[in-house]
Image (cartoon, rainbow, N blue to C red):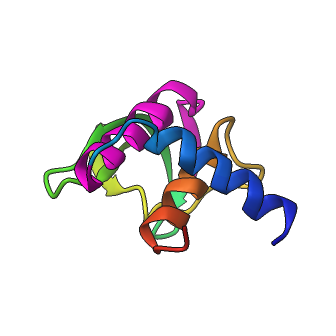
Amino acid sequence: RDEGSASLDALIEEARADALDEHEQRVGFLTMIEEHLGVPFETEVLGLGVRVLRVEPGADGGIVLVCERGSHRLRVPILDLPLPAPPPAGAEWIEAYRRWTRGMV
């Protein structure tokens, strides 16, 4: 395994600490992403520039990012949001969550 995978695995373990089931693990990720992600930041959704304002729990139990463009707001599942280059501070938590949801750990 490369160094990047090992560091993501360490973040996954930190987010999952003391969690008894998948729901609690997801809450752990939500908490860590809320604490560490540098919002607001700019990215693109469907080719349009948006400003990511905050992290929220999704209705389906997932995690969403609240994006804004002008007076419009859009809740985008965190698994679907393209990250800008360079990524915002704390983006490694999003990558760890994506890795966890793929069942790689």
Say how many tags the image has. Answer: 0
Compared across the picture, whether 69 is left or right of 33 comes to left
* Picture layout, residue 70 above or below residue 76: above
Residue 13 % position (x, y): 55, 47
Q: Check residue 41 for magenta coloring.
A: yes
Q: Which of 65 and 60 is in front in this view?
A: 60
* Picture layout, residue 48 above or below residue 24: below
* Picture layout, residue 104 above or below residue 34: below
Query: What residue lies at 67% left-to-right and 54% top-to-bottom?
Result: 8
Q: In which quarter of the image is the N terminus?
A: bottom right
Residue 86 appears in the picture as rendered:
yes
Q: Quadrant of the C terminus?
A: bottom right
Compared across the picture, whether 20 is left or right of 102 comes to left
Q: Main secondary structure of the magenta part?
A: helix
Query: What residue lies at 28% left-to-right and 50% top-to-bottom?
Result: 75
Q: Which residue lies furthest to the right in this view?
A: 3
Q: In which quarter of the image is residue 88?
A: top right
Q: Nearer the viewer, residue 39 or 74?
A: 39
Q: What stretch is highlighted in magenta?
A: 21-43
Residue 2 % position (x, y): 85, 68
Q: Which of 42 and 17 is in front in this view?
A: 17
Residue 70 appears in the picture as rendered:
no
Q: Check residue 36 for magenta coloring.
A: yes
Q: In which quarter of the image is residue 60?
A: bottom left
Query: What residue lies at 56% left-to-right and 34% top-to-bottom?
Result: 37
Q: Which residue lies furthest to the top in this view?
A: 35
Residue 93 % position (x, y): 58, 45
Q: Nearer the viewer, residue 25 or 96?
A: 25
Residue 36 % position (x, y): 57, 29
